[in-house]
Image (cartoon, rainbow, N blue to C red):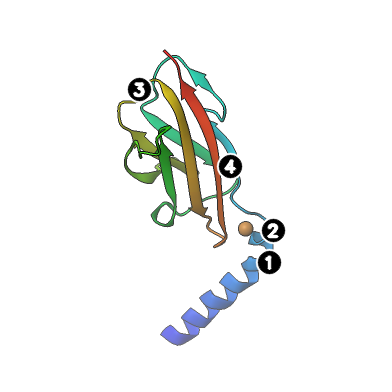
Amino acid sequence: MRNVISMIVAAAALSLLPVAALAHAHLDHAQPAAGAKLTQAPSEVSLWFTEAVEPKFSSIVVQDAKGAAVQDGKAEGAADNTAVLKVKLKALQAGAYKVTWKVLSVDTHRTQGTFTFTVAP
Ligand SMILES: [Cu+2]
């Protein structure tokens, strides 16, 4: 009985693939926004994607101009939105920062990208 159920579940999952494969998790928008010039240092970076992502298999790295990582801990999802990935930041000094994100979307496709923002109090 268990085998029959797992076969049905597998068949149902496969039948969803052609539809899901049409979409990938692209970055929709970010906070801070790409290219933003901020007068106050942000305490976290939040990314909104075009489809749900798997936080356990996704990452956000934020680096200062010297390449040192300034994120505080691992990227995590948001309780109210499966298409959001965010990471906390250490106290940022003035300067330029580069955000590099790599995500695994729920349709199992990997995407990645980078953008920068500047803190200029
Ligand atoms: Cu996709």
User: What's the CA distance linking mark 2 and mark 3?
Assistant: 41 Å
Disc 4 to disc 2, how far (Cα)?
16 Å
Report the quarter where the C terminus lies.
top left
The label number, if any, that marks residue 18 in the structure image? 1
Q: Residue at x 57, y 70 (%)?
A: 13
Q: Nearer the viewer, residue 65 or 72?
A: 65
Q: Three-letter amino acid code at disc 1?
A: Pro
The residue tagged with tag 3: helix, strand or loop?
loop
Q: Mark 1: few, some, or many residues within 10 Å (few <14, many ≥20)?
A: few
Query: Horizontal and vertical percent for residue 15?
Result: 64, 71
Residue 93 — which label?
3
Residue 114, image x, y percentages: 54, 41
Of callouts 4 and 2, the N-terminal one:
2
Q: CA distance from mark 1 to mark 4?
A: 22 Å
| The CB of the residue at mark 2 lies under 8 Å from ligand 1 | yes
Disc 1 residue lies near ligand 1 with CB under 8 A: no
- Graded by Cα atoms within 10 Å as few (under 14), some (14 to 19) or many (20 or more), the crowding at tag 2 reads few
Asked if the residue under mark 2 is in contact with the one under mark 4, i.e. CB atoms within 8 Å, the reply is: no
Quadrant of picture, ligand 1: bottom right
Q: Residue 104: x and y, percent? A: 50, 56
Between marks 4 and 3, how big is the CA–CA gap?
26 Å
Q: Which residue is mark 2?
A: 22
**Mark in the foreground, 3 or 1:** 3
Please report whichever mark, 4 or 3, sits nearer to the chain's N-terminal start: 4
**Looking at the image, can residue 48 be seen?**
yes
Residue 18 point in image, percent of width and height: 68, 66
Disc 2, SS: loop
Assign a secondary structure to mark 4.
strand
Q: Which residue is mark 4?
A: 27
Crowding at dot 3, Cα within 10 Å, few <14 / some 14-19 / many 20+, comes out as: some
Marks 2 & 1, CB-CB < 8 Å contact: yes
Horizontally, residue 14 falls left or right of residue 31, namely right
